[in-house]
Image (cartoon, helix red, strand yellow):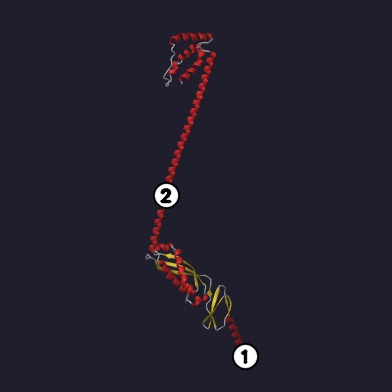
Amino acid sequence: MVPAIVVIVAVLFVLTVGIKSIRLVPQARVVIIQRLGRYKKTAASGPVIVIPFVDKILPMIDLREQVVPFEPQPVITEDNVTIQIATVIYYQIVDPKRSSYEVVNLTGAIERLTQTTLRNVIGGLALDRTLTSREEINSKMRIVLDEVTEKWGVRINRVELQDIIPPRDVQQAMEKQMQAEREKRASILRAEGQTQSSILEAEGSKQSAILQAEGRRQAAIVQAEGDAQALVTLQQAQAQSIQLVFNALNRQQPTPEILKYLYIQNLPKMAEGTANKLFVVPSELENIASLGATFSAASQDNGSAPSESTAGNVSPISDVAGR
């Protein structure tokens, strides 16, 4: 019975030692192995063999980038305004040994370092610049934190200001300022719109006046061209009338006495024109009676009355003389 118990105990001991001797480390994680209380090695992912009761495995270390948000912290700006700022740190462990032996409570140490660095950076900035210079603040904090945490085996990848909370009275003042700024921009836009509208109206009036003047000019040109064409047509008609009278007289072969008589007969009609100021009267006034007798004799020789032979020829001459 006793040997059986010993065998069972031995088997259990071997199983326990075997289980304790083999550990599995996940991907992107490492473990620190201590032997008899001293650092022995850093084991990477995969199976790890240790000596039970001699080697000790410290808590697993994650090598992936880690995101740690911190609660809002009160900080004072250069112009003595207390604001609350919440931050987010993105860091990664690059040396597991140093992160385990160089600092206690790595996350707490990073949080305290972030608070002090944030107060130093914000203390040199005014409130307005603090609210508008997040990238500058992030860059300064990352540089300082990376320099300090380098000896801890940690690399600070990014630092972000998650939220900036000014005091309530400052928020109200900022809201009033923003409202006044919006009203100012609205007034400027309305004034610019009215100015643009006035400019467009003036431009429209100018274009309208130009078009009206152009229309009047074109109308005057067309009217002048029409008057000129009418005058040309009238002159051509008069020239044709004169040519007809001239041809008729040439066919009848009038004597100088007849022409003088016709001239004197048309003098009253020529005097009707307002532009006629000077008339040439034949010097042979004493021959007027003989001109009438000669004209009557010539009319009888042609076989027609004087009124009928000269009615169609006198009016064109008188019209030409009057003009």
- Front position in the image: 113 or 256: 256
* Residue 1 appears in the picture as rendered: no
Q: Residue at x 51, y 21 (%)?
A: 239
- Front position in the image: 175 or 126: 126
Observer-side mark, 1 or 2, equals: 2
Question: Disc 1 and disc 2: Cα gap in Å?
Answer: 107 Å
Determine the secondary structure under disc 2.
helix
Question: In the displayed structure, would residue 179 be above or below residue 55?
Answer: above
Q: Position of residue 76 (x, y in %)?
A: 39, 67
* Residue 270 appears in the picture as rendered: yes
Q: Position of residue 133 (x, y in %)?
A: 44, 63
Q: Residue at x 45, y 42 (%)?
A: 204
Q: Residue at x 52, y 19 (%)?
A: 243
Q: Name which residue type carries label 1.
A: Pro
* Circle 2 residue: 192
Crowd band around label 2 with a 10 angstrom C-alpha radius: few (<14), some (14–19), many (20+): few
Point out the residue furthest to the bottom here.
2
- Front position in the image: 236 or 72: 236
Q: Residue at x 44, y 18 (%)?
A: 270
Determine the secondary structure under disc 1.
helix
- Front position in the image: 121 or 85: 121
Q: Name which residue type carries label 2.
A: Glu
Q: Position of residue 206 (x, y in %)?
A: 44, 41
Point out the residue furthest to the front here.
283
* Circle 1 residue: 3
Q: Quadrant of the N terminus?
A: bottom right
Point out the residue furthest to the left here.
80
Q: Position of residue 229 (x, y in %)?
A: 50, 27
